[in-house]
């Protein structure tokens, strides 16, 4: 089965998606080697420059492995992972890939003045009005992730608090025209007892991801604190190992 031809803008992203669609059709247990670049370019309908850019990104994520003189191979282990840290996946997708039915509920929405730490991270003045949005993701009606996002109120404008369970990425884009591009994340461990909003989780250790998200111009958009119950959800990551051997 050939992947879909590329017809829209952002060719690298489209090529990457088409490559992933193609990879999922392969019998990796039989052969995990990808066709030559010329064949892949024909299948997808992009130039070799675009193809290599997409392959480079997949290699950085551990999806494919490049072996000099042998070719490009799909990393079988990576394809079996349910959730990864890079690329960052939406929690609804992580929950679904982990075998649960996802649901999300907004539990708080407030305006407050930024302290010095928040102001420095978001590159705004201290006491600038910010919005704190809180929501809980559920896996088969069991709470599994608590998220707290902080963004400048100026990104939101005068729009009312949204109904339902909106995507913060989409809301920021609709209000400001800015799109998320990348984030810097720190990993911590905490107890659910450490935060009052984690009371639905009972008493247990949680994985805490603290991140600052930027747009395509490398300007900060929002802070995020994500508390994950790893008894329900497991995050994995393929890492390249660097070591200088002697001899």
Image (spheres, helix red, strand yellow):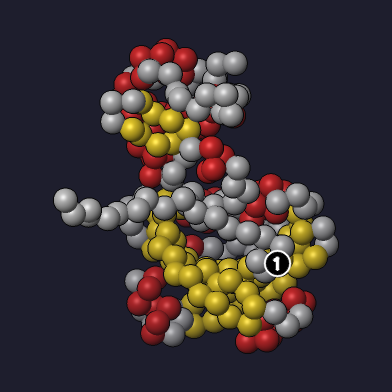
Q: Nearer the viewer, residue 210 or 73?
A: 73
Which residue is the extreme one toward the front? 247
Viewer can see residue 112: yes
Number of numbered discs on residues: 1
Q: Nearer the viewer, residue 223 or 67?
A: 67
Residue 191: percent from the left, percent from the top?
63, 82
**Above or below, comparing residue 55 to residue 157 in the picture:** above
Residue 183: percent from the left, percent from the top?
42, 59
Residue 235 is left or right of residue 181, and the answer is right
| Residue displayed at 16% across by 51% down | 247
Would you name the residue on which mark 1 appears? 231
**Above or below, comparing residue 38 to residue 50 in the picture:** above
Quarter residue 169 falls in:
bottom right
The quadrant of the image that shows the N terminus is top right
| Residue displayed at 49% across by 83% down | 113
Residue 152: percent from the left, percent from the top?
47, 70
| Residue displayed at 48% across by 62% down | 155
Give the structural element (helix, strand or loop) at label 1: loop
Viewer can see residue 54: no
**Above or below, comparing residue 76 to residue 28 in the picture:** below
Q: Nearer the viewer, residue 187 or 182?
A: 187
| Residue displayed at 40% across by 63% down | 184
Residue 2: percent from the left, percent from the top?
55, 16
Residue 11 is left or right of residue 149, and the answer is left
Q: Nearer the viewer, residue 213 or 61?
A: 61
């Amino acid at each position: 089965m050939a992947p879909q031809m590329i017809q829209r803008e952002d060719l690298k992203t489209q090529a990457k998606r088409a490559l992933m669609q193609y990879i999922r059709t392969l019998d990796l247990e039989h052969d995990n080697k990808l066709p030559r670049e010329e064949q892949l370019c024909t299948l997808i309908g992009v130039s070799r420059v675009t193809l290599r850019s997409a392959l480079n990104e997949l290699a950085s994520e551990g999806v494919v492995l490049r072996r000099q003189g042998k070719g490009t191979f799909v990393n079988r282990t990576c394809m079996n992972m349910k959730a990864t840290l890079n690329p960052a996946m939406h929690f609804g997708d992580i929950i679904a890939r982990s075998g649960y039915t996802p649901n999300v509920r907004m539990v708080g929405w407030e305006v407050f003045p930024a302290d010095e730490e928040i102001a420095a991270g978001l590159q705004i003045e201290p006491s600038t009005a910010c919005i704190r949005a809180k929501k809980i993701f559920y896996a088969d009606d069991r709470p599994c992730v608590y998220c707290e996002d902080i963004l400048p109120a100026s990104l939101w404008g005068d729009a009312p608090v949204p109904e339902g369970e909106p995507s913060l990425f989409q809301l920021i884009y609709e209000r400001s025209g800015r799109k998320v591009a990348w984030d810097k994340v720190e990993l911590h461990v905490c107890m659910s007892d450490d935060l009052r909003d984690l009371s639905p989780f009972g008493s247990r250790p949680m994985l805490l991801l603290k991140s600052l998200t930027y747009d395509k111009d490398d300007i900060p958009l929002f802070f995020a604190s994500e508390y994950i119950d790893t008894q329900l959800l497991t995050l994995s990551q393929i890492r390249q190992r660097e070591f200088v051997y002697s001899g």
